[in-house]
Image: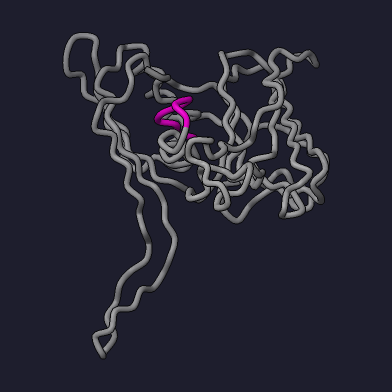
């Protein structure tokens, strides 16, 4: 079985001092919540984003959320401590490609992405937890058709992952904000547009340590702060991508002490 659910609850990127190779739109926008705020480069040359943290902190994941890199683009993530590289992902493909068994000759473009139906394309780098005081992200996509490179939001931090995974019964709902209305002639018209995901799951087997870590983290950030949710990390394909997004806690946080040394909690996250 693949890895358990992961949550980046405290986003270190929002605390970092940032720089970028070029900024047609400011790199500080990757620290802001809102779909209209994006960092954008001035051209398609190689771009390096550097984030300097207030001090050494544990990191186990970096997420580029809502980027425009094509299937031929690459991402490289490095963690640094006192100027020394303590982790280097090397260059990796920025987006998941259509598998050869699924790719259709003459229909799908060579190097086409497999997840274009989803509203935001993302690139996630998961690692063993390491201590770093800065990290560096290198983006390469010289043939990008947009004429620039772009990222909506960046997440970095130590992921919370329970010892026992979420229970079966995970619910994912695509909320569609369009509404149907009838005209006087009884024709059906649809007004409004847009969508957002609503994810609900149960953690039925939280030991004392997992319960305490989850409680501290969720109570610290409340409902106002963005959280990166990945229900099926490193599972790959559409299943992982559809269940991974930036969200805020929709429900109140609570837990039930149902038996000796075990707690249960149901949590709902709504996509921002």
Residue furthest out toward the left: 259
34 shown above or below 256:
below
**Residue 236 horizontal/vertical position (percent):** 47, 30
| Residue 50 location, quadrant | top right
Q: In this view, does 151 lie to the left or right of 2?
A: right
Q: In this view, does 125 lie to the left or right of 235?
A: right
207 shown above or below 271:
above
**Residue interval drawn in magenta:** 228-236
Q: Residue at x 36, y 12 (%)?
A: 209
Q: Residue at x 53, y 40 (%)?
A: 98
Q: Which residue is drawn at 56% across and 47% down?
A: 105
- Res 31 visible: no
**Residue 87 horizontal/vertical position (percent):** 69, 15
Q: In this view, does 167 lie to the left or right of 116?
A: left
- Res 131 visible: yes
Q: Is residue 240 magenta?
A: no
């Amino acid at each position: 079985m693949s890895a358990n659910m992961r949550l980046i609850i405290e986003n270190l990127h929002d605390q970092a001092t940032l720089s970028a190779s070029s900024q047609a739109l400011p790199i500080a926008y990757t620290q802001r919540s809102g779909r209209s705020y994006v960092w954008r480069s001035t051209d398609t040359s190689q771009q390096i984003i550097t984030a300097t943290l207030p001090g050494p902190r544990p990191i186990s994941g970096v997420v580029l959320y809502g980027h425009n890199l094509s299937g031929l683009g690459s991402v490289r993530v490095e963690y640094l401590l006192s100027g020394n590289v303590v982790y280097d992902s090397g260059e990796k493909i920025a987006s998941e490609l259509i598998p050869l068994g699924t790719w259709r000759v003459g229909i799908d473009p060579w190097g086409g992405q497999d997840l274009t139906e989803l509203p935001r394309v993302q690139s996630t780098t998961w690692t063993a937890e390491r201590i770093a005081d800065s990290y560096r992200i290198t983006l390469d996509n010289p043939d990008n058709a947009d004429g620039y490179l772009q990222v909506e939001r960046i997440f970095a931090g130590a992921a919370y992952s329970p010892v026992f995974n979420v229970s079966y019964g995970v619910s994912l709902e695509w909320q569609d904000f369009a509404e149907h209305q009838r005209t006087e002639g009884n024709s059906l018209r649809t007004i409004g547009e847009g969508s957002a995901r609503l994810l609900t799951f149960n953690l039925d087997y939280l030991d004392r340590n997992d319960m305490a870590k989850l409680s501290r983290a969720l109570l610290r950030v409340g409902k106002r702060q963005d959280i990166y949710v990945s229900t099926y990390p490193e599972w790959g394909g559409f299943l992982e991508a559809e269940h991974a997004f930036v969200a805020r806690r929709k429900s109140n946080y609570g837990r039930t002490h149902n038996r000796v040394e075990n707690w249960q909690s149901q949590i709902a996250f709504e996509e921002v």
